[in-house]
Image: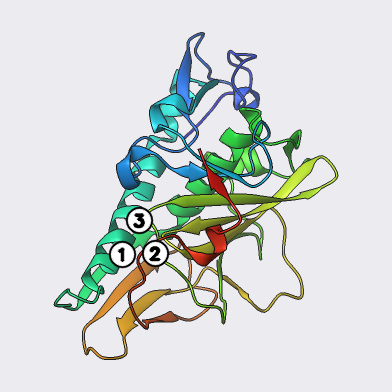
Amino acid sequence: MAHDPAGHQNPRCYARELGGCSRAISREHYISKSVPLAGGKPRIGGLRFQDPETLQSFGVEGMTAKILCEPHNHDLSPLDTEAARFFSTLRDFDRDLRDAAESKTTEASIDGAKLERWMLKLLAGLVYGDLISSATLRRETPWLEILFGLEGWPPGWGFHFVASDETLYSFDGLEVSTRTVEDEVWAAEMGVAGLKFYLCLGKPEGNPALLRRPAGLVMRRADRDAYKRLTFQWPSDPDTDWVELTRVGQYDGPRPQDGGYKEE
């Protein structure tokens, strides 16, 4: 994606510094329309305009803002496609590991670099769509060039899997919580299908639970030989080894961590 900084810069496009804008602004979905969520209505909490401890269902079509011009929006569309594949794969894996299912071994691969940039795209959409209170993504970082594939991630930045000893509960949703320093967003934790991932505009220090760019995920049940393996494809060798996850049973109903929320 080559851009000309001397070209047209649409003041309504957050990627205007790259140049190459059109005069037309497209309607950008905060959460990619192609990402398969249950009923098409992600449940989200913690947005700027929400009451505390409120979990709301939003139609994806209604969660839009005019924050990208048409060419820049088009440039990022392959990231939405890869995120949709990621969500679908995790959902399929989970379905095949349920109590009543007859599991079979399944393998899939995801372009980790595109997924990593999609997470950054989601975060940029929330910030520049004014849905979270912080003013901007971390200043004096090349996040915009990284998002559009013009620069690579500095060492230690980017995608991490959050390893936890706690029991994880699968769900067909997406959760996002940001990490801020004053008015800057430096990182975000995202819950995808019950698993936790961390995107950092910086190098996190002293947190052994954050596993940067793992080789992939292996999901299995203790009572079955079949397993699910999702490989992350990275531009270079993975930073960490495979993450092993074992399903211990099936739980239907609200997750325990949602107990403090009211749904609207």
Kindly state the secondary structure of the residue where label 1 is placed.
strand
Q: In the rendered structure, which disc, 2 or 3, sits on the residue that comes first in sequence?
A: 3
Q: Nearer the viewer, residue 231 or 180?
A: 180
What's under tag 3, amino acid-wise?
Answer: Phe
> Helix or strand or loop: what does disc 2 sit on?
strand
Tell me if residue 162 comes above or below residue 190 in the rendering. below
Q: Is label 1 or label 3 in front?
A: 3
Structural distance between the alpha carbons of marks 2 and 3: 12 Å
Residue wearing tag 1: 109
**Residue contact at pointers 2 and 1, CB within 8 angstroms:** yes
In this picture, residue 128 sits left or right of residue 71? right
Kindly identify which residue carries mark 3. Answer: 86
> Percent from the top left, x then y, of residue 20?
53, 20
Counting residues from the start of the chain, the first of labels 2 and 1 encountered is 1
Circle 1: residue type: Ser
Q: Give the residue displayed 49% in from the left and 73% down from the top.
A: 214
Query: Would you call the spot at circle 3 few (<14 residues within 10 Å), some (14-19), or many (20 or more)?
Result: many
The answer for how far apart the CA atoms under marks 1 and 3 are is 9 Å
What is the image's colouring? rainbow
Bin the neighbour count of mark 2 within 10 Å (Cα to Cα): few under 14, some 14-19, many 20 and up: some
The residue pinned by badge 2 equals 233
